[in-house]
């Protein structure tokens, strides 16, 4: 549906997008991932014919963005970072206007307006003036205008930015439900969003393509490390963590035990097993047989966030892989916020 | 063509849902109403005086009332036109809705022409207010309607030109105040450019006076249909709208 080859956008002083190539198949949801300023918006703007590429080519539904912009625009629904709303218009009036400039007429237009009002759950504000809508409604009206002409391709620039958690979930569900009929590219710097909504991820950083893969593959890659987090508690109020560590190290298949932190009569360890050997059962048995309680035993999987950090910043990569999971998550989310 | 009309209707409705249109119409109605009242009052006074003296000084309502009033309408337009055109593109750029228009299957020219047309129609609304005043002259007097019609045509052409300049300038900035102020400055300069012709006739001065708006409006004001001046205004309108389309396109290359 979308083919991008060696797409480049150069400005006077910097290169915003640097020889990016990727392909998106029909009906897929693709997450476009990258820190702020990575070139996500620029790439999307080139796909929507808002910006012309400096070099390289992009085709949408078989039409080149430079040669057949009108055909491309007819097949694309675009939600920019800030929904493009006219504050003085009413919701239905606005959707009518957008429908008309996208080429809808008469009964078909009113049918589509009713459909998107319903689909994006904005029917209850259809008589309200857009300037007075809350952020969540504005975002959904923005989504409604993007799908009004039933485009083949939907391009959504940070569709959940600035929404509250409930609205984020609703918007994600809405996007997921749209996937069957439309091919969707959505950009974000929030990783769970990609994990939850997308099938494929395209990661870019500083204008360059870093990775493109399916979400499953990326997650599998993350689990490869295979270390386990164990929380152990003492039964009678005393727990010597050095003793526990020594005991864990004796479990067959364990290559390394690292003490993480100790709480009130509890200790947490990160245990690394030798290549692919199942150590969980042995660990649990060893702990219980030694007379301690096993509070928790879980995979210390690296989240997409950590892969993302590893891929996008080589400096931080080492810090993340040696640091704890929780620290990694915090670093990633603070990066996402900043 | 459909798209031009869609854009134009949207622009007109946004003029009329916000207070801008009403404020502009009210300002025009008050100021022009005052001029009209003043001018008609003086005409009546002069007429009674002539009658008392018994002189047969010819009284002509077209020459003595309508013509000066038309030139007043033109000057009021100079002040109000920047206020009409300043928001056309600046507002869309600020609100981010320009991205919607630019990614919709609508040609730039349709957007530009639609917006300009909406501005011209709003100006037409102001002229309608003045026409209500003039209607009283036809009710109680017997003026000739042809010079008035030609004068209105001239007003439209002249306003169309200034609005095309305003559209262009509005496409250069995101700030409406800047767009309005610069448009006013440019129009004012074009207004007074002809002054040099009074003492100078070098080629530079001739070019300057050729660019001057009132010089081309003069014949319309007199009630003469001058093809030369009409061509000047029409081609200037096209130039303004063409520059706008260049500026819109350059936005994409620069932004």
Image: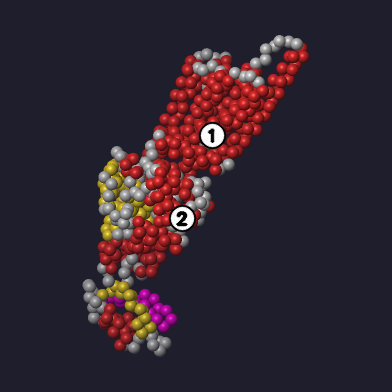
- x and y percent of residue B11 in the render? 49, 39
Indicate left or right for B49 with A39 as reference: right
- At 29% from the left and 58% from the top, the residue drawn is A200
Q: Which residues are magenta?
A: A254-271
Give the residue at mark 1.
B122
Image label count: 2
- x and y percent of residue A213 in the render? 27, 58
- x and y percent of residue B37 in the render? 68, 27
As for residue A310 lying within the magenta part, the answer is: no
Q: Is residue A59 above or below residue B40?
A: below
As for residue A257 lying within the magenta part, the answer is: yes
- The answer to whether residue A230 of the structure is visible from this angle is yes
Q: Kindly report which numbered mark, 2 or 1, lies closer to the viewer in this rendering.
A: 2
SS label for mark 2: helix
Indicate left or right for B178 with B43 as reference: left
Give the residue at mark 2.
A123
- At 39% from the left and 67% from the top, the residue drawn is A327
């Amino acid at each position: 549906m979308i083919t991008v080859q060696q797409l480049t956008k150069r400005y006077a002083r910097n290169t915003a997008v640097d020889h990016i190539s990727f392909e998106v198949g029909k009906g897929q949801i693709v997450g476009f991932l990258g820190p702020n300023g990575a070139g996500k918006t620029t790439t999307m703007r080139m796909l929507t014919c808002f910006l012309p590429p400096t070099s390289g080519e992009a085709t949408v539904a078989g039409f080149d963005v430079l040669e057949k912009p009108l055909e491309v625009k007819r097949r694309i629904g675009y939600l920019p970072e800030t929904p493009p709303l006219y504050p003085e218009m009413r919701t239905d009036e606005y959707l009518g206007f957008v429908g008309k400039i996208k080429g809808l007429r008469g009964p078909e237009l009113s049918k589509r307006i009713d459909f998107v009002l319903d689909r994006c759950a904005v029917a209850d504000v259809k008589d309200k003036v857009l300037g007075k809508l809350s952020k969540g409604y504005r975002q959904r009206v923005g989504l409604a205008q993007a799908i009004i002409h039933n485009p083949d391709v939907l391009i959504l620039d940070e569709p959940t930015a600035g929404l509250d958690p409930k609205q984020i979930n609703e918007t994600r569900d809405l996007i997921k439900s749209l996937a069957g009929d439309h091919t969707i590219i959505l950009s974000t710097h929030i990783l769970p969003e990609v994990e939850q909504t997308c099938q494929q991820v395209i990661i870019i950083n500083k204008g360059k393509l870093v990775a493109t893969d399916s979400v499953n593959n990326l997650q599998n890659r993350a689990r490869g490390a295979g270390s386990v987090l164990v929380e152990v508690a003492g039964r009678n109020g005393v727990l010597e963590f050095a003793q526990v560590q020594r005991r864990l190290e004796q479990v067959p298949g364990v290559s390394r035990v690292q003490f993480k932190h100790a709480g009130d009569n509890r200790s947490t360890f990160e245990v690394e097993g030798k290549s692919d050997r199942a150590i969980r059962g042995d660990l649990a048995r060893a702990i219980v047989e030694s007379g301690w309680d096993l509070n928790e035993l879980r995979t210390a999987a690296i989240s997409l966030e950590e892969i993302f950090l590893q891929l996008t910043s080589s400096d931080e990569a080492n810090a993340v892989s040696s640091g704890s999971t929780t620290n990694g998550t915090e670093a990633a989310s603070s990066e996402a916020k900043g | 063509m459909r798209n031009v009309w869609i854009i134009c209707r949207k622009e007109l409705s946004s003029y009329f849902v916000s207070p801008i249109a009403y404020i502009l119409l009210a300002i025009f109605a008050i100021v022009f109403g005052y001029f009209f009242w003043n001018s008609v009052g003086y005409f009546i006074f002069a007429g009674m005086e002539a009658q008392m003296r018994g002189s047969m000084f010819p009284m002509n309502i077209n020459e003595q009332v309508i013509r000066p009033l038309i030139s007043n309408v033109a000057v009021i337009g100079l002040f109000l036109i920047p206020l009409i055109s300043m928001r056309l593109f600046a507002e869309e750029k600020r609100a981010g809705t320009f991205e919607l228009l630019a990614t919709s299957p609508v040609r730039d020219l349709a957007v530009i022409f639609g917006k300009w047309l909406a501005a011209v129609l709003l100006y037409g609304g102001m002229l309608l207010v003045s026409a209500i005043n003039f209607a009283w002259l036809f009710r109680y007097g017997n003026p000739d309607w042809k010079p008035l019609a030609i004068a209105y045509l001239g007003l439209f052409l002249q306003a169309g030109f200034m609005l095309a300049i305003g559209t262009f300038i509005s496409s250069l900035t995101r700030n409406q105040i800047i767009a309005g102020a610069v448009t006013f400055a440019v129009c004012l300069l074009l207004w007074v450019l002809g002054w040099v012709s009074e003492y100078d006739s070098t080629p530079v001065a001739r070019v300057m006076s050729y660019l001057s708006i009132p010089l081309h409006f003069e014949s319309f004001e007199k009630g003469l249909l001058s093809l030369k001046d009409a061509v000047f205004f029409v081609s200037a309108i096209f130039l303004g709208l063409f520059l706008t389309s260049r500026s819109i396109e350059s936005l994409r290359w620069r932004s």
